[in-house]
Image: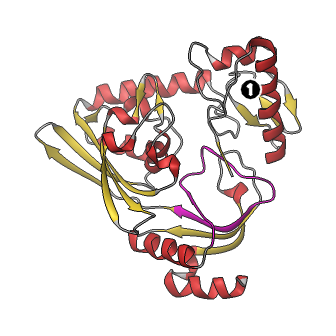
Amino acid sequence: MDKQKILQDLRKIIPKDNIKIDEPMSKHTSFKTGGPAEFYITAKTIEDIQNIFQYAKTNKIKLYIIGNGSNLLVSDEGIKGIVLKIVLDNIDILESDFGVLVKAGAGVKVMSLAQELKKRGITGFEELAGIPGTIGGANYMNAGAYGKEIKDIIVETKVLNKETGNIEILKNKQQHLEYRNSVFKKNNYIILETTIQLRNGNTAEIEQKMNEYLKQRKEKQPTEFPSAGSTFKRVDGFITAKLIDECGLKGYQIGGAQISEKHAGFIINKGNATSKDILDLIAYTKKKVFEKFGVQIEEEVEII
């Protein structure tokens, strides 16, 4: 389908200011790498998402959904099709018989929600405060930190069913939330809003806990460099970062990509990395760990 025709069509169904052509994905990923997206669209309403989804489906155009790009590695060649960034940013807080229900749009940043909850004296979210992504992304991959995963507090999630085009509600158990995995990775749904169960607490205690977790994160993780967080998944019976460290790979570098000297579980962009550098370093790391320990590690980062 002609690119100009697609652009004309898109401008009829979504505000033209929300559409960018050949947009560098290096601007929209925490790795700060990645080639251009043929069409980059920000969706600020559920109606926008439905319209773009239906248009892409009808015209057989590949559609990629992203949040904050904090767990994403996009190839240097870029992305053909439509990249749809969800920026639904509503936060609704309701008292319930079991505590406090918080409804957060998929585009709400985890840290922004944590700050809002702290301000209102709502506890149960502090461990997750430093996760760099959005609520939608955290729900998608069942993100976690310091012994807590988002599955521990999710009640339900509002989604767009890609098969039917309908808006549905999936309860916690229907989402099959496991370690860095969920039903959403099968790509059948677009996450629109997540409802979590929390409780009232003490603002000073919440702030103290949050600050402690953020301090630990800053001390132990290379937050001063672009990365996608932990590059590799945990392996049953092994600490993945320890395996990488024992292979002598801390500080090992390919191009501008380096295995962090602070935390071997992180690959960082030292300033001029390409996505190919990062991919090559991921492959090299997996190879070396397998050669030394016979353990197959898997990347946690999503690759497009």
- Relative to 22, residue 253 above or below: above
Q: Where is residue 185 in the image (x, y as percent from the top left)?
A: 52, 47
Residue 41 lies in what quarter of the image?
bottom right
Q: Nearer the viewer, residue 194 or 260?
A: 194
Q: According to the image, label 1 marks what residue?
A: 260
- Horizontal relation, residue 50 to residue 262: left or right: left
Q: Position of residue 70 (x, y in %)?
A: 60, 45
Could you classify mark 1 by the number of other residues whose Cα lies within 10 Å: few (under 14), some (14-19), or many (20 or more)?
Answer: many
Q: Is residue 217 visible?
A: yes
Amino acid found under the numbered disc labelled 1: Ser
Q: Which residue lies furthest to the front in this view?
A: 163
Q: Residue at x 64, y 33 (%)?
A: 223
Task: Indicate whether residue 268 is drawn in magenta.
Answer: no
Q: Can residue 272 be seen in this view?
A: no
> What is the number of callouts on the image?
1
Q: Where is residue 258 in the image (x, y as percent from the top left)?
A: 80, 31
- Horizontal relation, residue 56 to residue 25: left or right: left
Q: Residue furthest right?
A: 255
- Horizontal relation, residue 231 to residue 206: left or right: right
- Relative to 205, residue 28 above or below: below
Q: What element carries label 1?
A: loop
Q: Where is residue 208 in the image (x, y as percent from the top left)?
A: 37, 25
Q: Looking at the rendering, in which quadrant would you find the N terminus?
A: bottom right
Magenta stretch, residue numbers: 61-85
- Relative to 37, residue 71 above or below: above
Q: Which residue is drawn at 65% across and 19% down?
A: 240
